[in-house]
Image (tube, helix red, strand yellow):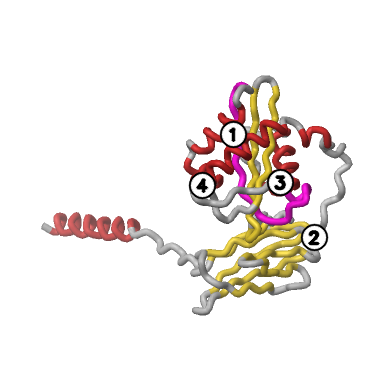
Amino acid sequence: MTSIKKRTTVALTAAILATTLAIPATAAEAPPIRVGSYKGSTLEVGERSGLIIGPSGTDYTVTSSNPDTMAVEQVLTFWVAVAKTVGTAEITASNSARERGSMTLTVGPEAPTALETPVIVDSASLTDNMEIRQEIIRLINQTRKGNGVPELPVNEALMNAAQICSDRRYTWHHAPEESQAAVDAGYPYGFGSNLTVFTGTAEAARRAVDNWINSPGHFETIIDPRCDCIGMGVTQCDGITYCYMFVGIPNSVNFYA
């Protein structure tokens, strides 16, 4: 009997221990406000990065623990971190309910100028395939009009930026490079972009627009009522057509500007 009691006690002890070990550790509670940076947690002197603050749709006050190292600026409804001098700073966002969230940003020294040969853009290429580009714009404006939104005038800066990107023959979106191309071409605001690539060069304008219309996300960009201008780039090389559409959104921010 004593032996049975001992075995029972051992079994109960083992069961209790197993139950205790099975209880998961309590996860650290997430902060009520999330703060992030488009360009990561380390910036170079002189660099700017948009801040990602959530939940969205709330007014925030954003401060820096060390404005001489990392300043913060409000641009329209966005907040931007501006790297001033080498060091670190804590960026804190708060709302009217006194909830807070923060992140630490580090400022490193400005990178030395690269000695590599710069990429040279052939100015003549900016006028390539102009008939196809104009036809795509006509078809897009026809689609916008049919969906009750205004037609878009051509913007020379966006035309050049879109052509530069199509000449690079991208087959998927390269957001930083697209943003920098728009800035370098002289367009200072945010924008939307569509890209399509297909084999063949015949009826390129119609094929490009059909591809975008038949893709819900691309179609939404085409008929976006916030847009006020358009640029188009088309490159045809080795039997493949690359088409880029940029549409300007004036009440938005390009964080590379």
Between the residue at mark 4 and the residue at mark 2, the CA separation in whole angstroms equals 35 Å
Crowd tier of the residue under label 3, counting other residues whose Cα lies within 10 Å: few below 14, some 14–19, many 20 or above: many
Q: Earlier in the sequence, mark 2 or mark 1?
A: 2
Labels 2, 3: front one: 3
Q: Residue at x 53, y 48 (%)?
A: 223
Between the residue at mark 2 and the residue at mark 3, the CA separation in whole angstroms equals 25 Å
Q: Residue at x 64, y 51 (%)?
A: 191
Q: Tell me where residue 188 appears, x and y as whole percent.
A: 73, 56
The residue that label 3 is drawn on is: 158
Secondary structure at badge 3 equals: helix
Q: Amino acid at mark 3?
A: Leu
The residue that label 4 is drawn on is: 220
Labels 1, 3: front one: 3
Quadrant that contains the C terminus = bottom right
Q: Amino acid at mark 4?
A: Glu
Crowd tier of the residue under label 4, counting other residues whose Cα lies within 10 Å: few below 14, some 14–19, many 20 or above: few
Q: Residue furthest left?
A: 1
Q: Tell me where residue 155 appears, x and y as whole percent.
A: 71, 48
* In this picture, residue 173 sits left or right of residue 71: left
Q: Residue furthest right?
A: 115
Which contiguous range is marked in magenta? Answer: 181-200
The residue that label 1 is drawn on is: 196
Crowd tier of the residue under label 1, counting other residues whose Cα lies within 10 Å: few below 14, some 14–19, many 20 or above: many
The residue that label 2 is drawn on is: 46
Q: Amino acid at mark 2?
A: Gly
Q: Earlier in the sequence, mark 1 or mark 4?
A: 1
Q: Is residue 152 above or below residue 31?
A: above
